């Protein structure tokens, strides 16, 4: 009789468990959620009623549950979101490579030289016309 056991392909993906099937990170997040959510429920139950207090408690505890359970590409939620913020807002988006075409630059320089020479020639002609007109 053969017994098959599933073995993780990558040993780095195996996480040590602290309590039951939860990691230390999950235990801390769940404990923090309970430490904040349950007293909040007990304090607001008398004034707001049980339904509203329960909804508020769930709304306050959900981010802690999210940070405990969410993991993408091996990163916890806060590290993943920090990388997204850096990538989207703090660093430039598309980095374009811009080459300098030496032939275009040389042609532009020659065009400008020709334009300057034409303007100088025009100026000389005006001076000659003025000097002939005065004589």
Image (cartoon, rainbow, N blue to C red):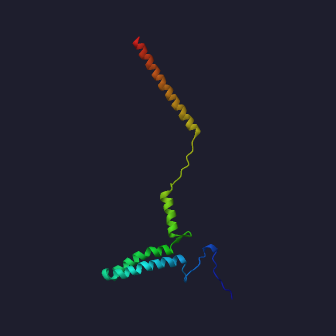
In this view, the residue farthest toward the right is: 1
**x 48%, y 62%: residue:** 85
| Front residue of 99 and 21 | 21
Residue 84 lies, with reference to residue 42, above or below; the image says above
> Residue at horizontal 51%, vertical 77%?
26
Outermost residue toward the left?
A: 47
The foreground one among 122 and 20 is 20
**Residue name at image x 52 percent, y 63 percent:** 83
Residue at the farthest top position: 135
111 above or below 91? above
Location of residue 77 with respect to 55 vertically, above or below: above
Which part of the image, by quadrant, shows the N terminus? bottom right
Q: Horizontally, is 104 left or right of 42 in the view?
A: right
Q: Give the residue displayed 41% in from the left and 79% down from the top.
A: 37
Quadrant of residue 129 within the rendered picture:
top left
Which residue extends farthest bottom?
1
Which of these two is toward me, 33 or 100? 33
**How many numbered discs, if any?**
0
The location of residue 46, given as percent across then percent down, is 32, 83
* Image-quadrant location for residue 132: top left
How far across and how far down the image is residue 66, in percent?
47, 74
- Residue 109 x %, y %: 54, 33
Q: Quarter-wise, where is residue 7 in the image?
A: bottom right
Image quarter (top left, top right, bottom left or bottom right) of the C terminus: top left
Which one is in front, 124 or 59? Answer: 59
């Amino acid at each position: 009789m053969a017994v098959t056991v599933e073995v993780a392909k990558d040993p780095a993906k195996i996480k040590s468990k602290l309590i039951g099937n939860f990691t230390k990170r999950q235990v801390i997040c769940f404990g923090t959620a309970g430490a904040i959510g349950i007293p909040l429920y007990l304090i607001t139950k008398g004034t707001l009623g049980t339904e509203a207090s329960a909804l508020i408690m769930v709304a306050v505890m959900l981010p802690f549950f999210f940070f405990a359970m969410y993991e993408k590409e091996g990163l916890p939620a806060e590290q993943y979101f920090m990388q997204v913020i850096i990538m989207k807002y703090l660093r430039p988006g598309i980095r374009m490579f811009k080459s300098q075409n030496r032939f275009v630059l040389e042609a532009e320089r020659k065009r400008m030289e020709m334009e300057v020479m034409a303007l100088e020639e025009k100026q000389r002609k005006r001076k000659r016309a003025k000097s002939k007109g005065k004589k």
